[in-house]
Image (cartoon, helix red, strand yellow):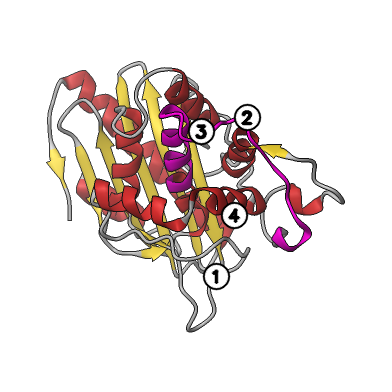
Amino acid sequence: MQRTIEQLIGQVPARVMLLFRDLDEDLEIAYDADRPVVAASTIKLLVLARLYRAFAREQLDPRARVQIASDQVVPGSGILRWLAEPPPMTLRDLAVLMTIVSDNVAANALIDVLGFAAMEELVVELGLTGTALRRPFWGRAAYPGEPENLVTARDLATLLAALELGHIVPGGHWLDDLRMLLRAQQFRDIIPARLPEAVIVGNKTGTLPGSVHDAALLWAPFGRAVLVLLTSEVTDFEATRRALADLAKEIVDHWQQARQRGNSTRGGR
C-alpha cells in the first residue's frame, strides 16, 4: 500500500504530507507526516477544540454575544467581511462561521475571547510539537519577519482523534455539536470529493498561495478514522485538489479492504 500511496503522491503537483489513522484498529499510513507547513485555515480546528472545551466546562456561555468592530474586519474567506454592519454574534454562531465557511473575522473574534495562551495550553497538553498558532488570520501568508501559523499532518490527526475520542470535549451535547459543524463544512472538493455517500466526512480545509490542505474525521459503516492531507510548493491548485481527492479515495478503499480482511497493518515513512 505504501508504494501505491507514493505513486499517487508523485502525481500531485506539490509536496505532500499525509497521515491516516484508524481510530479503533492498528492501521496507520504516514508520509512525511512530521514536516511543519503553513497551517492556513486548518489551525482553526485548534480554536474550535479549545472553544468547545470551554463550552463543555461552562467556562464560556455559547450564547454570549460579541460585536464585530470595523477594525476587526480582515480579507479572506467568510461572510462577515461583506456585511455593512455585522450584528452581534453569539460565540457559537462565530464557531459555525469559522468552521463551515472558514470565516477569518469570526476566527479572530474567537481568538480574542479565548486568548493565544489557551490554545498553547492545549497544544502542550496534546503534545503537538509541530503546531503553533502565532498570529490572527489576515487572509494572507505571513510576510518575511512576521510570525506564521504552523501545523503537521501528524499533529492535526492527533487533534482530530482526541476530539472524536472525547479527550478534549467529553461525549455529550457539545461533542455532538462540534461533529455536526465539521459535517456541515461547505468546502468539500478534496477529501470528501470522491468518497462514497456511506462514508460521512467532517472536515476543515485551508488554502494559501502554495498550500492546499484538508483534515477530516471519517465515519464509515466499517469504522472511524482521521485523514490529513497537507501540501506545500503547489504549482497547480486545481490539479492538486483533484489529485488529493484521488489519493483520499485510494486510502479509504484500502481502509475498507483492510477492515474486511480483519488485518492490522502499520506503514509509514
Does the magenta portion include 128? no
Direction from residue 257 to residue 218 in the image, left or right: right
Q: Quadrant of residue 6?
A: bottom left
Dot 4 or dot 2: first in sequence order is 2
Q: Residue 179: image x %, image y %? A: 47, 27
Residue ID for mark 4 = 108
Q: Is residue 207 positioned above or below 265 on the image?
A: below
Residue ID for mark 3 = 182
Dot 1 or dot 4: first in sequence order is 4
Mark 3 belongs to which amino acid?
Answer: Leu
Mark 1 belongs to which amino acid?
Answer: Ala
Residue ID for mark 2 = 63
Residue ID for mark 1 = 141
Direction from residue 25 to residue 202 in the image, left or right: right
Dot 2 or dot 1: first in sequence order is 2
Q: Nearer the viewer, residue 164 or 112?
A: 112
Q: Which residues are magenta?
A: 46-72
Direction from residue 209 to residue 258 in the image, left or right: left
Q: Residue 63: image x %, image y %? A: 63, 29
- Residue located at (39% from left, 30% from top): 218
Can residue 195 be spotted in the picture?
Answer: no
Q: Residues within 10 Å of mark 1 (few under 14, many from 20)?
A: some
Q: Residues within 10 Å of mark 3 (few under 14, many from 20)?
A: some
- Residue located at (51% from left, 33% from top): 182
Q: Give the structural element (helix, strand or loop) at label 2.
A: loop
Dot 3 or dot 2: first in sequence order is 2
Q: Residues within 10 Å of mark 4 (few under 14, many from 20)?
A: many
